[in-house]
Amino acid sequence: MNEFGENVFILDHPLITHKISILRDKTTGTNEFRQLVEEIAMLMGFVALSDLPMTKVPVETPIETADTYVIAGRKLAIVPILRAGLGMVSGLTALVPSAKIGHIGLYRDETTHKPVEYFCKLPSPIEERIIVVCDPMLATGGSGVDAINLIKKHGGKKIKFVCIIAAPEGVKKLHEEHPDVQIYVGNLDRELNANAYICPGLGDAGDRIFGTK
């Protein structure tokens, strides 16, 4: 068990670690960065979705009728936190193409420092779905906490959070605020610096995914 306890999963798969190392390199260009984010999201999703409920169905093979299993229920809602979270969506939907996709946009008021929702569109009925919230980076944890608060306000119950890198401060905050949410982290970085940037980090994930500055 890691230092954060139950429901926090720090992944140490060699393929994930290798690809994150390339992400960190400041010379990695936009196209390669974007592709790596998709690949890492797919690898992480394979782990994060290992507990999906299954149901038995009969299938006619070319040889005989077989009792086999498919994903049960209304399956998934994938909810990226705008904008960087969009880069992880295609990797996750490659695993479950039938997943519905929502979007959450938040910003912090410069005066009150409280979160302000500027966009929220979730698949219905959200309360019946397993919800995967994705964001490449978990720094202070503020956006993750606010996004999950918003999802719960709309009725969401079964929530997972997937991020590529995280600072210990962000993982601690998110886990304390939402202990029922499973948190999957590709790599736990050292710390936040004075400007709340993850160290060693990988820069601004949104800018590097979309080629903006």
Image (tube, grey):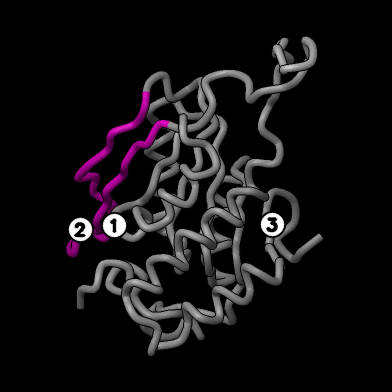
Task: Indicate left or right for 143 with 22 as reference.
Answer: left
Q: Amino acid at mark 3?
A: Phe
Q: Reading the chain from its start, which is encountered first: label 2 or label 1?
A: 1
Residue, disc 1: 83
Query: Crowdedness of circle 3 by 10 Å Cα count: few (<14), some, many (20+)?
Result: some
Kindly check if marks 1 and 3 are in contact, taking CB atoms under 8 A apart as contact: no
Marks 2/3: CA–CA distance: 32 Å
Which quadrant would the C terminus be assigned to in this image? bottom left
Residue ID at (22%, 42%): 119
Residue, disc 3: 9
Residue ID at (58%, 49%): 45
Q: Would you say the magenta stretch is mainly helix, strand or loop?
A: strand
Q: Is residue 139 above or below residue 78?
A: below
Q: Amino acid at mark 2?
A: Asp
Q: Reading the chain from its start, which is encountered first: label 1 or label 3?
A: 3
Indicate the secondary structure of the residue bearing disc 3: strand
Residue 64 placement: quadrant: top right
Residue, disc 2: 109
Q: Is residue 201 above or below residue 92?
A: below
Q: Reading the chain from its start, which is encountered first: label 2 or label 3?
A: 3
Query: Crowdedness of circle 1 by 10 Å Cα count: few (<14), some, many (20+)?
Result: some
Magenta-highlighted residues: 100-123
Q: Position of residue 127 (x, y in %)?
A: 48, 22
